[in-house]
Every structure is written in structure tokens, then in C-alpha cells.
Amino acid sequence: MRLKFGLLGLLAILLLAWWWTQAAPSGKAGAGRRGRRSPAAAAADGSGSLGVGSRDLDRSGEGKVRGRIVDLDGMPVTEGRVILHCLRPLAEQSFPIDGGAIEVGAEGEFVGPGCRGLVCAEFRHTSLLPREPWVFETNLAEQTVTARPLERITGTVLDPGGQPVAGATLMVRRGRDDDPMALPPFTTRNTASDADGVFNFARVERPPCDPCGEASGRCEPGDALEVPTYNALVLVARAPGYRSVERPVELGEGDWSITLLPPLAPVTGTLLDPEGQAYPRARVLARSRLRSYEVHQALVEGDTFRFTAIGEGGYDLRALQDGAVLATATEVEAGAQLELVGTRPASGPALVVELRRDDDGAAVSGAQVDGGPFSGARTDAEGAVRAEDVAPGSYALVIRAPGAGTQRREIEVPEAGSGAEGAIVRRFDIVYKAP
């Protein structure tokens, strides 16, 4: 009897062991249900393979990151934008956090979404960059970080007597044999001199490398995608009452001072139509043949125009009205006196453009109209703008109405018939589609 019960007990133990092994997960022999972890749970705490899991595809933020930006003197930086990036534990690369582009407040403060990992702050500013990598942890107290100014090249604009010139325009351009795809090594190509004649250019610098940039490979020097910068630099200075001056410069120079020169004899002239009539809205452009960047503009007052800042070499002139070329002249040098005759008649019909809504036909007042004979014109209470003596032709108009964005329309002013052209009104209704 004891033998019988012993055999039955042994059989029960074997059946229980068989059932236990069948209930265990197939991944590891002997692993119980309590040892199983979902992929989401593994990714949440960074214990998955290289931190990559279903949560790594979700770029939404968690918690808050609080920061305050000050300059080297401890004063708040009141402008700029912060872009937050997340680096999860053991992750191979970082990613920008959704909603993590934040404008800096009036006291240098910013608050943005955090994440389960390190948060790196990228700083967008025209003249500042982080002094050190900005790294944050989520849901901690406000952290103060410091921005430093970009390295600058400084110079002074002087007149022929050695006195500083305020309001001069400075430009840096590439040398004539430089790479046409190259960019200047500065944040902008142009600047202006202050009240003391001083100007400066902020140099382009790579920000300090943070953990997010290092993990994503953004810190590697010599990136093949980098755009080349100028090999040779030419500084150009211009100011009213002086002729344009340029000189080669180098980044290693201690001072980029440049002296303006007095203008040569002015270029003067008249502009009339074939019947001897003056144009109501004409202007003349003069471009240097030696210095393609140098362009001057003179309004035609009555029937005369005048250029007072002409330099050496020849200039090509174009007389225009409402976007159409009226007359040209080439190889014009300082001291020339010109008599230009336009190819179009100066007189023509009045042009009225009315703007109305497409849904109810109501007039659109206060809209800005540019193009053709209009420059910054505003529609009146009836939704209309008017121009006198408009020559026949096609005109592209750009219309900006409050709350409705920008729209473009093209109108065709036909050739005038017989009669007193000044009494003819060409009227166009433009249907404006509201958003």
C-alpha cells in the first residue's frame, strides 16, 4: 500500500513540474511570468537595447525645463529662441522635442517641455552663443545659463579729413577669383557705422558641443555639408555725399578702418516722352560697370534727374516707370549731361482698381496694393485705389488685406483709343478671396 501511494505522489510531482515548464515564457527556460517586461517598460527606463523602443518614436515632452539666460555681466538676455533636444539613456542619437522651440522672455527666462533623459538647449541669436553647453534635467528648479558675444571684427569709417562718418553702409564681398558658392564668415554681409563712425561684423562660430550634439554627430569638425567661406575679403563702404570705396581686408587685421572719398562731378539729365511731356512717376537707376554691387537711384522731378555719388568708370542707366523700361544709356561717366527720350507716352488713362470680397461683394478698405503704378497704396472706404496717366500693358499687383494674407493678381491695361486720354478711366474689379 505504501508503495502504491509513493508512486502516485511521484506521478503528481512530475505532472506539476511538466505544467510549470509549459506555463513559462518561451524566451528563457525557467523564467516565470513575474520576470517578463514589456518593450515599452524597458524603453521607458532606458534598459532596452541602446535605449531604443516604442517611446523613442514619441517626441512629445514630459515635465518641464526651466532656464534663465544672462550675459557675461549677469544681465538678462531679452531676445532669441531656445530649441530643446532630448537624449534618452543609452540612446544612439538625440531628437528635438515637440513644442520645444521657445522664445526667450523679457527677463531672459524660458520654460519648455522636458523628457526622460538629458535636455540640451540650442540657442538661436544674431550675436550671442552659449558660453558652455546648456544641459538641463526635467522638473528641477530654474537653472541660469550664460551666453557670450560672438567674436567681432571692428573698424571705423572716416571722411577725407579723418573725421568719423555716421550712417555709412558697409558690405563684405568675396574676391573676384573666389568660389561663387562661398559665404562670408560673418552672420551678415552688411552693417552700418554708428555715431562715432564705428562698425563691426560678428563672426560665424560653432557653438560648444553638448551631449545631444555629440550623440547625433553634429560636433564632428570638417562636415562635408559645410559651405565654404570667402578666401579673399573685400570691404566696401558707401555714404551719402561720398563715392563708393573698397579695399582688401584680412580676418587677422587689428583694424578695418576705411576712408571715404569725395564724389566726382555729378551726372545730370532730363527725361521726356516723344511728345516732350514729363513722366509722373519715373526714376533712373545707374549701375557701375566696374563694381556690379554699386547701384544708385534718382527720382525724376519734373523732367530732370541727378546723381551726386558717382565714382570712377562707366555706368549703365535705365529710366523706368511702373516697372517698364522707358530709356537706357551706357558707359555714362562722371560729369555727363544726358537727354533721355522715353519710348512710351507720358499721358494715359487713369486706372482705378476696386477690391471686393468674393462671398458678399463688400468693398475691402485698408488693403495695401503694390505693383505697376501703385506703391504702398491703400484702398479707400469704397475699396478702391487710383493712379493717373497709366501706360498700356500688363501689371502684376500684390494685395495685402487685413486678416487675409497676401494675394497676387494681374491686370491688362489695353491700348487707348482716340480722344482725350486723360479723361478715360480704366476700371478693374478684383474679387478678393477671404480666408
Image (tube, grey):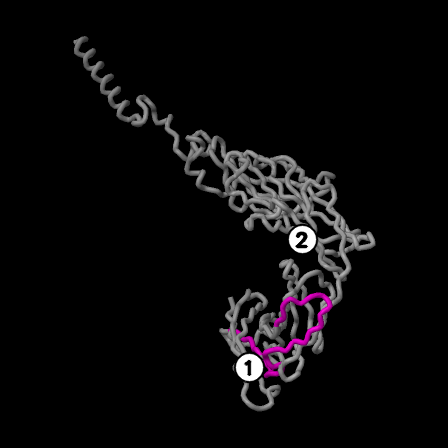
Q: Which mark is residue 427?
A: 1
User: Which residue corresponds to the image point at 53% horizontal and 67% vertical from the top-left?
Assistant: 407
Judge whether residue 327 can be spotted in this image.
Answer: yes
**Range of magenta residues:** 328-357
Quarter of the image with the N terminus is top left
Residue sitting at x 17%, y 9%: 3
Q: Residue at image x 60%, y 39%?
A: 206
In this view, the residue farthest toward the bottom is: 419
Q: Is residue 388 magenta?
A: no
Using the image as rendered, state which of residue 12 and residue 164 is in the foreground: 164
Q: Find out whether the residues at labels 2 and 1 contact each other: C-beta distance under 8 Å.
A: no
On screen, residue 330 above or below 235: below
State the residue in front, 261 or 404: 261
Specify whether residue 339 is painted magenta.
Answer: yes
Which labelled disc corresponds to residue 224?
none
- In the displayed structure, 37 sits above or below 402; it is above
Residue under label 2: 171
Residue 64, quarter of picture: top right
Element at badge 2?
strand
Q: Amino acid at mark 1?
A: Arg
Residue 175, given in percent of the width and then of the height, sits at: 62, 49
Q: Residue 159: where, in percent of width, then height?
A: 79, 55
Q: Residue at x 47, y 33 (%)?
A: 91
Amino acid marked by disc 2:
Met
Q: Position of residue 114 (x, y in %)?
A: 55, 39
Seen in the picture, residue 154 relative to 267 is either above or below; the reply is above
In this rendering, position of residue 177 left or right of residue 278? left
